[in-house]
Image (spheres, rainbow, N blue to C red):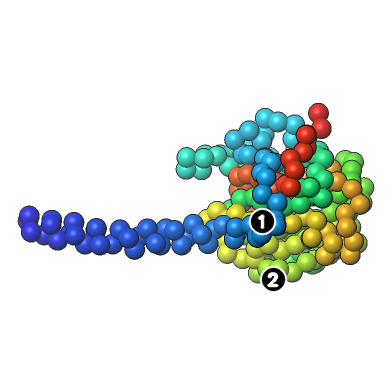
Amino acid sequence: MPGNDAQCTRRRRALWPLAALVVAGCAAAMRPPPPAAGEPVLPYPLFAASDALMKSWRFIRIWGQSEWRLIADGDDVAIEPVVDGSSTALARWVQIDTETCPVVEWSWRVDRLPEGADLAVRATDDVAASLVFAFGDPGALSNPRPVPTLRYVWSTPANAAGSVIESPYFIGTLYSFVVRSGGAGEGWHTERRNLREDYQRAFGEAPPGPVEVMALFTDNDHLEAPLHSLYRAATLYCTELPDEAFPS
């Protein structure tokens, strides 16, 4: 009926502002707060899913069968690790001076966390999604030399958000910063961390040199529990832009 149609139209128009607020609130919840005064603001792209697998990345099969692939994600694309009781990394050799480029921002999504995983225990040290920054050249990542390393992880609820966990495998060398705990299936999130400050927190001193390797790392080789994660992009924020962060 015409009268009902008009009423429905008025109701929809009345709800549009509310819907816009809800959408804006969700978008705000997915992103970190804007940079504080004095933080570096010059962006330098670190990777984007649209071209990451075509550049000088190295696929590292650490244990078992795994692969990395690009998948469609709405109007965008994402990097998807595929593991099956395995451990894998997608790595790139870099030169990141954290004195001038200390801040990294990235977007990721976890749809399923490995049930029972706990990063503090050797037998359950599985992770759905993580970004690794090695300060020094670890050599072959399938059997790396110990160099100071930060890892930003999306953990199960066994590890509290905000905690810093010393690796049970690489004691005194690798520290995991739990950026997000639980909350699988909540869509994309964008995170921001200060590499230099986190290094100081983990090792008690300023970084002695640049980041030489960055990697995306996912594994379920301990518990073989199903997991699913995606990575989209990462950006450095600098006080002055580097001439070249990626050695040829």
Work out whether residue 17 or residue 65 is closer to the camera in this orientation and state it: 17
Please tell me whether residue 10 is drawn above or below residue 88 in the rendered image: below
Q: Secondary structure at mark 2?
A: loop
Q: Which residue is the site of mark 2?
A: 160
Quadrant of the image occupied by residue 152: bottom right
Q: Is residue 183 visible?
A: yes
- State the CA–CA distance, disc 2 to disc 1: 18 Å
Q: Is residue 171 visible?
A: no
Q: Residues within 10 Å of mark 2 (few under 14, many from 20)?
A: some
Location of residue 80 in the rendering, given as x and y in whole percent from the top left corner: 62, 44
Q: Quadrant of the C terminus?
A: top right
Location of residue 82 in the rendering, given as x and y in whole percent from the top left corner: 65, 45
Location of residue 30 in the rendering, given as x and y in whole percent from the top left corner: 54, 58
Location of residue 47 in the rendering, given as x and y in whole percent from the top left corner: 67, 40
Three-letter code for the amino acid on which mark 2 is drawn: Ala
At 30% from the left and 58% from the top, the residue drawn is 16
At 35% from the left and 60% from the top, the residue drawn is 19
Work out whether residue 51 or residue 158 is closer to the camera in this orientation and state it: 51
Q: Residue furthest front?
A: 38
Q: Which residue is the site of mark 1?
A: 192
Q: Earlier in the sequence, mark 2 or mark 1?
A: 2
Q: Is residue 144 left or right of residue 158?
A: right
Three-letter code for the amino acid on which mark 1 is drawn: Arg
At 89% from the left and 64% from the top, the residue drawn is 204
Q: Is residue 169 left or right of residue 7?
A: right
All told, the count of numbered labels is 2
Q: Residues within 10 Å of mark 1 (few under 14, many from 20)?
A: many
Work out whether residue 59 or residue 194 is closer to the camera in this orientation and state it: 194
At 60% from the left and 45% from the top, the residue drawn is 232
